[in-house]
Amino acid sequence: MSDAARLGAALATLAVRTWPALSADARSSVLPALDGFVTSPSPSRFVLAARALADARRRMRRERLDALLGERTFARGATRLEAVGFLDDELRAQLVAQPHDAAAGRRLGALAALLDAHAELAARLRSVEAAHVTIEPRPD
């Protein structure tokens, strides 16, 4: 068996394992490297094609993990927002209707924390003890 045949068999094995896990965009990014090896098999083109397959697989895994982590983070933020009692259902539904990614989840969590802090400060100002506090103007 020639070197080109061995490299071709090894690349075929890598491609068969990797190809089903790739999206259409990832497949289209890998095709030029695979075509380059098929048209002119050489060790350097094998390395390029194998690296393109590995990079595409790594990108797909990272995208899947990012999406999963984003969904979890969004769920945590939505849960914190759900715990804020004085928001009406329509506003809560509008806030939760945004794309479910990690940044949106962090924003929802921060908003819930701000709303909780606002409610606590408002309650303190309405309390009996707050009526006895005098706020004097700053001397200029």
Image (spheres, rainbow, N blue to C red):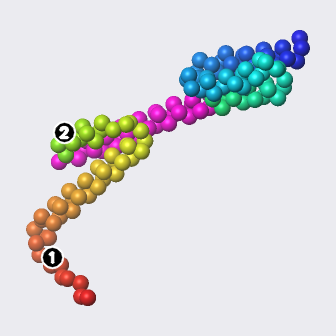
The tag earlier along the polypeptide, 1 or 2, is 2
Q: Is residue 130 at all visible to an observer of this figure?
A: yes
Q: Residue at x 76, y 23 (%)?
A: 36
Q: Where is residue 87 in the image (x, y as percent from the top left)?
A: 19, 46
Q: Nearer the viewer, residue 37 or 87?
A: 37
Q: Distance between the residues labelled 1 and 2?
A: 36 Å
Q: Which residue is drawn at 84% across and 26% down?
A: 43
Q: Which amino acid does label 1 sit on?
A: Val
Outermost bottom residue: 140
- What residue would you read off at disc 1? 133
The reply to whether the magenta stretch includes residue 125 is: no
Image quadrant occupied by the C terminus: bottom left
Image quadrant occupied by the N terminus: top right
Q: Which of 129 and 24 is in front in this view?
A: 24
- What residue would you read off at disc 2? 89
In the picture, residue 132 is in which quadrant? Answer: bottom left
Q: Where is residue 3 in the image (x, y as percent from the top left)?
A: 88, 18
In the picture, residue 89 is in which quadrant? Answer: top left
Range of magenta residues? 57-86
